[in-house]
Amino acid sequence: MDRTVNILAFAGSLRKASYNKALLRAAAELVPSGATLEIFDLEGIPPFNQDLESQPAEKVKEFKAKIKAADAVLIATPEYNYSIPGVLKNAIDCASRPYGDNAFAHKPVAIMGASPGMIGTARAQYHLRQCFVFLSCAALSQPEVIVAHAHEKIDEAGNVTDQKTRDKIKELLEALVAWTNRLKEA
Ligand SMILES: Cc1cc2nc3c(=O)[nH]c(=O)nc-3n(C[C@H](O)[C@H](O)[C@H](O)COP(=O)(O)O)c2cc1C
């Protein structure tokens, strides 16, 4: 029998008016029954320094503990220079170390992303998928949630107003919950 799927969600942006944070807030509203969604803010995660990886900052300890406790992870990534923002890569690096203590190991993970441009983070999402290979994550392939022209779909108050985008986010959450339950059974 399916148990509640607890999803930890974070955005690769620190910006207050972030479109990607807006996607996460919409996801919190659209989470299916049988699942919960908690949003974690990456603000305060220090730059990774391998010399200090055995004594992580409190914020890194908290981030790792929340990932480990979650049944699944949802990431909303911006696209910076055709890739993922340094803030997101740094957070992932911190949570994957020290060697042998990768918080993401075997975690079901789903991605979405929003950008004002016409490619809507597709390039960044594929770079993020490459990280999941080494992280040993069970990345969900479909549906892809690639939100182009984000300024036309998210209003100034940070609400996702475009119905098709909301439907896609819902579809992604439903797929993530089903995927997580399938992996639990395996
Ligand atoms: C350093 C930097 C690089 C960017 N590079 C890209 C890019 O490669 N592709 C793109 O679509 N948008 C690019 N943008 C624009 C971002 O998509 C835009 O700032 C977006 O709002 C960031 O996501 P957020 O709203 O969640 O903070 C870039 C923005 C910054 C600050």
Image (cartoon, grey):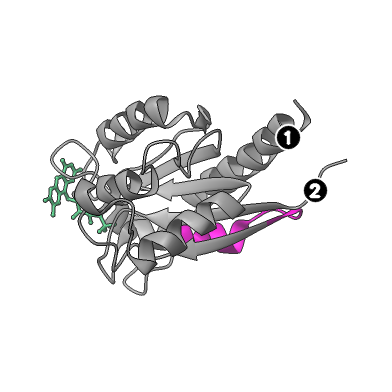
Badge number at residue 167: none
In the rendered view, does 111 fall on the left or right side of 78? right
Image quarter of residue 20: bottom left
Range of magenta residues:
24-35
Image quarter of residue 17: bottom left
Q: Residue 25: tell me if it is visible.
A: no
**Answer yes or no: do the residues labelled 1 and 2 have beta carbons within 8 Å?**
yes
Q: Image point 27% across, 45% down: which residue?
A: 89
- Is residue 141 depicted above or below 2 in this figure? above
Badge number at residue 3: 2
- Label 1 CB less than 8 angstroms from ligand 1: no
> Badge 2 local density, few (<14 within 10 Å), some, or many (20+)?
few
In the rendered view, does 23 fall on the left or right side of 166? left
Front in this rendered view, residue 168 or 110: 110
Q: CA distance from mark 1 to mark 2?
A: 9 Å
Q: Residue furthest left?
A: 81
Instruction: Name the amino acid, label 1.
Output: Lys
Q: Is residue 148 magenta?
A: no
Q: Residue 79: tell me if it is visible.
A: yes
Front in this rendered view, residue 15 or 67: 67
Which circle's residue, 1 or 2, is located before the other in the chain? Answer: 2
- Is residue 95 depicted above or below 132 in this figure? below
Instruction: Name the amino acid, label 2.
Output: Arg
Q: Position of residue 41 (x, y in %)?
A: 38, 65
Q: Position of residue 126 (x, y in %)?
A: 32, 29
Q: Image point 24% across, 54% down: which residue?
A: 52
